[in-house]
Image: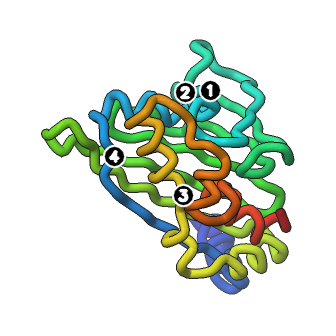
């Protein structure tokens, strides 16, 4: 079997500068079972608990998160612009989204584990990859401690406990003007 062309491609790739990549992880317990938590991790349902969340559903048979659903967020969304695809959908344990923003690809993985006491352990992993020079610079500007600044878990905890979205002023109390971790990242990536 002749693999000369593929070996040449790999060799050329290895000789070039690699894309910048940053992984951000945060985790914590949530005050509901995995089924209830999982249902909130949806482009439509996030409108119920994330202040400023807006999206345009492009494709979904159900109107909710499902494998290969596609949606878009604009400049007016709290997390900034992007084209999103649900790339893994395994209720109630794991959901993944890939988001395309100008010069960066973002992959979000959310894993849920039943604690057996009516709560859920959640682990959120965001992998950002620059796809060109501008993207590499943007990924390089993201602070290493940005995962420590997340506001997602407090907002989701409030919603799961009360059934209501956290008030904007209350979200500001968690820092960063009530914006999500994604919006903090996008400020570095897209200048928001």
Q: Which residue is mark 1?
A: 44
Tell whether 81 sits left or right of 110: right
The structure residue drawn at horizontal position 25% and vertical position 45%, both measured from the top left corner, is 113
Q: Which residue is mark 4?
A: 30
- Going from N to C along the chain, the mark reached first, 4 or 3, is 4
Q: How far apart, in angstroms, are the residues tagged by discs 1 and 3? A: 19 Å
Q: Nearer the viewer, mark 2 or mark 3?
A: 3
How many numbered discs, if any? Answer: 4
For mark 1, give the secondary structure: loop
| Residue 151 circle label | 3
Q: How far apart, in angstroms, are the residues tagged by discs 4 and 3? A: 13 Å
Viewer can see residue 2: no
The percent coordinates of residue 154 (x first, y second) are 46, 52
Q: How far apart, in angstroms, are the residues tagged by discs 4 and 2? A: 20 Å
The percent coordinates of residue 124 (x first, y second) are 44, 55
- Going from N to C along the chain, the mark reached first, 1 or 3, is 1
Q: How are the residues colored?
A: rainbow
Mark 1 is surrounded, within 10 Å at the Cα level, by few (under 14), some (14 to 19) or many (20 or more) other residues, namely some
Q: Which residue is mark 2?
A: 65
Q: Nearer the viewer, mark 1 or mark 3?
A: 3
- Going from N to C along the chain, the mark reached first, 2 or 3, is 2
Q: Which quadrant would residue 36 be assigned to in this image?
A: top left
The percent coordinates of residue 63 (x first, y second) are 62, 17
Determine contact: label 1, label 3, CB under 8 Å. Answer: no
Determine contact: label 1, label 4, CB under 8 Å. Answer: no
């Amino acid at each position: 079997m002749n693999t000369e062309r593929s070996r040449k491609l790999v060799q050329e790739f290895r000789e070039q500068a690699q894309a910048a990549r940053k992984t951000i992880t945060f985790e914590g317990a949530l005050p509901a079972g995995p089924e209830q938590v999982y249902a909130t991790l949806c482009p439509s349902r996030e409108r119920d608990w994330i202040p400023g969340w807006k999206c345009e559903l492009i494709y979904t048979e159900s109107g909710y998160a499902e494998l290969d659903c596609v949606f878009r967020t604009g400049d007016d969304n709290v997390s900034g612009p992007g084209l999103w695809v649900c790339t893994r959908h395994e209720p109630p344990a794991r959901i993944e989204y890939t988001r395309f923003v100008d010069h960066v690809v973002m992959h979000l993985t959310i894993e849920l584990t039943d604690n057996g006491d009516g709560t859920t352990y959640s682990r959120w992993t965001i992998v950002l990859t620059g796809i060109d020079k501008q993207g590499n610079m943007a990924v390089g500007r993201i602070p290493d401690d940005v995962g420590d600044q997340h506001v997602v878990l407090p907002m989701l905890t409030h919603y799961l406990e009360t059934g209501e979205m956290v008030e904007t002023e209350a979200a500001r109390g968690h820092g960063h003007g009530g914006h999500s971790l994604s919006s903090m990242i996008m400020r570095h990536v897209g200048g928001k």
